[in-house]
Image: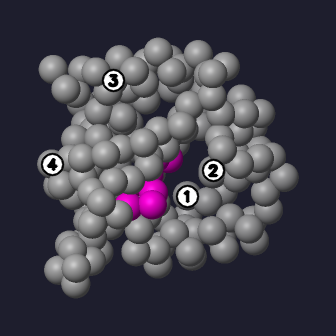
Amino acid sequence: MHNKLNLFKNYKNKIISGKKTILRRLKKSDLNNCIVWLKDPEVNKFLSQGLKDITKEQEVEWYNYITNSSCDMVFAILVNNGKKYIGNCGLHKINFNDRSCEFGIFIGEKNYRDRGFGSDVIRTLIQFAIEELKLDKLKLNVYEYNHQQRYIKTAVFLLWI
């Protein structure tokens, strides 16, 4: 288990490249964008927690927790030129013994929604979880009213082809 935790710590700083996106560790300097996005009703209606009233202090507290977590990895999503930060994704409740985790994603920048960036992130994150972390059970909760779920199902299906 000790070996797995060291492996996990090494991956927290990993940069993961997809076809359209780059995933890098979330930085404290990203939090101002996160707060704006989390307060956006178009973003937070799809999240498992109501965050429309989140404060800077709460976001910093969450960031400090997530940074030190031994079972969570949160990444900033950048367009593949590395210059535009458009959202976040993460693996949560990682359990190496059970080889499982939950994952989540949101595209905060409105101009980058419905353009294939989310699908690319999902494929990239799932591939990383399976190939690098050796996980084989990944869970994503999707609200029924989330019209994006058809893209999520497509992204997951394409990974297994």
Q: Which residue is mark 4?
A: 131
Q: Position of residue 66 (x, y in %)?
A: 51, 69
Dot placed on the residue nearer the N-terminal end, 3 or 1: 1
Mark in front: 2 vs 3: 3
* Furthest residue in direction front, as rendered: 98
Eye-nearest disc, 4 or 1: 4
Q: Position of residue 99 (x, y in %)?
A: 27, 57
Q: Residue at x 27, y 77 (%)?
A: 5
Amino acid type at image mark 4: Glu
Q: Which residues are magenta?
A: 88-94
Of mark 4 and mark 1, the one earlier in the sequence is 1
Answer yes or no: do the residues labelled 1 and 2 have beta carbons within 8 Å?
A: yes
Q: CA distance from mark 4 to mark 1?
A: 28 Å
Work out whether residue 96 or residue 66 is closer to the camera in this orientation and state it.
96
Report the mark closest to the observer, 3 or 1: 3
Check residue 89 for magenta coloring: yes
Residue type beneath disc 3:
Ala
Does 145 appear in magenta?
A: no
Residue 132, above or below 146? below
Looking at the rendered structure, the kind of residue marked 2 is: Asn
Disc 1 residue type? Asp
Residue drawn at x 84%, y 52% as measured from the top left: 53
The residue at which mark 3 appears reads as 155
Q: Position of residue 75 (x, y in %)?
A: 42, 54
Q: Label 2 belongs to which residue?
A: 33
Distance between mark 3 and mark 4 Cα atoms: 16 Å
The kind of secondary structure element at disc 1 is: helix
